[in-house]
Image (cartoon, rainbow, N blue to C red):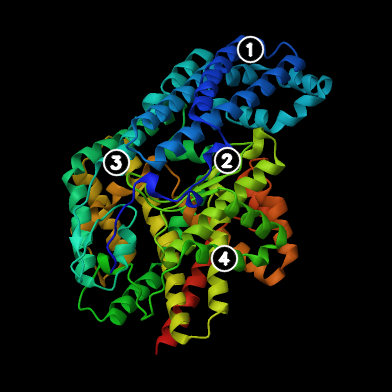
Amino acid sequence: MAKVVLRKRSEIPSEYKWCLEDMFSSDEAWEQEYELVLQKAEAMKAFCGTLARSGEQLLRFWEADDDLHYYVNRVVVYSNERYHEDTAVAKYQDYAAKADHAVTAASEAEAFAQPEILAIPDEVLAEMYAREPGLERYRRAMDEIRRAREHTLSEAEEKILAMTGEIAKAPDNIFSIFNNADIHFPSIRDLEGNRVSVTNGNFTLLQANRDRSLRKQVYEGFYHTYEQFGHTIAMMYSSQVKVNQFYANARNYPSARAMFLDSGNIPESVYDNLIAVVHKHLPAMYRYVSARKKLLGVEHLHMYDIYVPIVERTEHEYTFEEARDLVLAALEPMGEEYVSIMRSGFESGWVDVYENENKRGGAYSWGAYGTHPYVLLNFQGDLDSVFTLAHEMGHAMHTYYSNANQPITYAEYLIFVAEVASTCNEALLTQYLLNHTEDPGERLYLLNHYLDSFRTTLYRQCMFAEFEHIAHTRQASGETLTQEVLDQIYGDLVKLYYGPDMVVDDEIVHEWMRIPHFYTSYYVYQYATGYSAAIAFSKRILEQGKTAVDAYVDNFLKGGSSADPIDLLRAAGVDMSTETPIEAALNVFENVLEQFLKECK
């Protein structure tokens, strides 16, 4: 295999870097706007005690609130995206910390608002709506505040909670800088004798290598490195769980999960349904693991065997340009407008493509209202990188449509639906690839890849969701989340989800240590629910064409947070309040598995 050499940021050609200058022409411009945010936050305090005075005054507050959040979002996104380009740059570490301060300052300045809005009698608020038509735009926002009445505290208490904002981000911030800048993995030698640097960015790619001894070396070196810091990482994660429990207790929620799901008005039954339905379909996963063991021809299947393709295939390395064109072709069923906007994004500095020294690992899409979305990649040139590109551009398109069609008040979609558009793109790409190959070997490879996408996005993310819920439940009951406790929880779940044909190596029990999404609590379950919805939407789009596309774009992608996420999905044709989409998605997995096993014979 080729030697992996990380370039410095300055060595990456400009055409493969995002254009953050579209947001701020210079760092100096950011610094000026940062100061402006602090001024606007201070000015918000003048509204304190006045919101019940008149509809006109209440409207002025909401307009000032939109204005403040417009600038806060810009300050946060730019600073963090500069920081993520090279996490070792002290200047941008400082910018990101200042952005956290700006968020806290804004929250603290507005702490009076929710208690005051809650205190307005219903009849008085109704009269305000009647006298000031401009308030209608903010009716949903106020309805959401009033829905959370029992979880909103007094003005003084809300101010204290707002002041804890920067402290509350400490576990996430500490883990981020540890995981992206401070931790270093041992390099290994491949069969040609090349020295290969192992990173968070290329770990999964190396785990897909055909050389089993290399996979084993990478796997053991990677997780033994985390294990060396196990007690420290356990303290980081335990602190995150404690932060969540503190806020849940302070806001009178029965649990941290109830608090996080309530932000989107998601019934807890949705979370429980997901785990229950996945457990019901675990035998299908066991069959897949058994087939993987047989097809790899190994006596014992280890976790370092789980990413390598089980079908022989001529390895194809994609250039970024090839990946881009493939994604655009696969998404043609979405219609000319959708594809045209995405093509323009590729040409206009939306995407930061390649890994460089100290760049944040993984991939994401993020943007600020008023500027196009941005996509961070660590493109490795394999098929997974092509799927990651399709996935993150799905996020970007969701952001683009929401921002273009909603006022800033409702532009940001909630996390429950955050993974639907991205995964729908992946499903369309899968179907395109299957439809455009006549090579039986290529077809088997793609079916294998499809099965693995179910494994990683539905089964594995559900396992992650179960892990963090067990951890939160244990913490709430008074148990200390030591490394040993967290390793035990995770190891037991690996045994449950992968079944009797998988060897649960000592190293895999440490996998929880490297998952950054555990610091965005109760997020990962939405990969699984989003995947289920995405499978349903992609099927509708391919079968119904423009009718389904219009419903999907108009009722969902353009919807932002203008309605509850479950209602947006239902209006577009998928009801996630039931078990039906999850059952249907797992039935697809079982059908693809049957097809795969049949064609393997």
The percent position of residue 286, horizontal first and vertical second, equals 34, 72
Q: Tell me the number on the disc at residue 181.
A: 3
Q: Position of residue 237 (x, y in %)?
A: 30, 39
Q: Which of 523 and 73 is in front in this view?
A: 73
Q: Distance between the residues labelled 1 and 4?
A: 51 Å
* Residue 517 point in image, percent of width and height: 39, 45
Mark 2 to mark 4 CA distance (whole Å): 39 Å
**Marks 3/1: CA distance?**
42 Å
Residue drawn at the location 61% of the way across and 49% of the way down? 398
Q: Is mark 1 on a helix, strand or loop?
A: helix
Residue 132 vs 310, above or below: the answer is above
* Amino acid identity at mark 1: Phe
Q: Mark 1 or mark 4: which is in front?
A: 4
Q: Real-space Cα distance between discs 2 and 1?
A: 28 Å
| Proximity of marks 3 and 1: CB atoms separated by less than 8 Å | no
Residue at which label 1 appears: 47
Circle count: 4
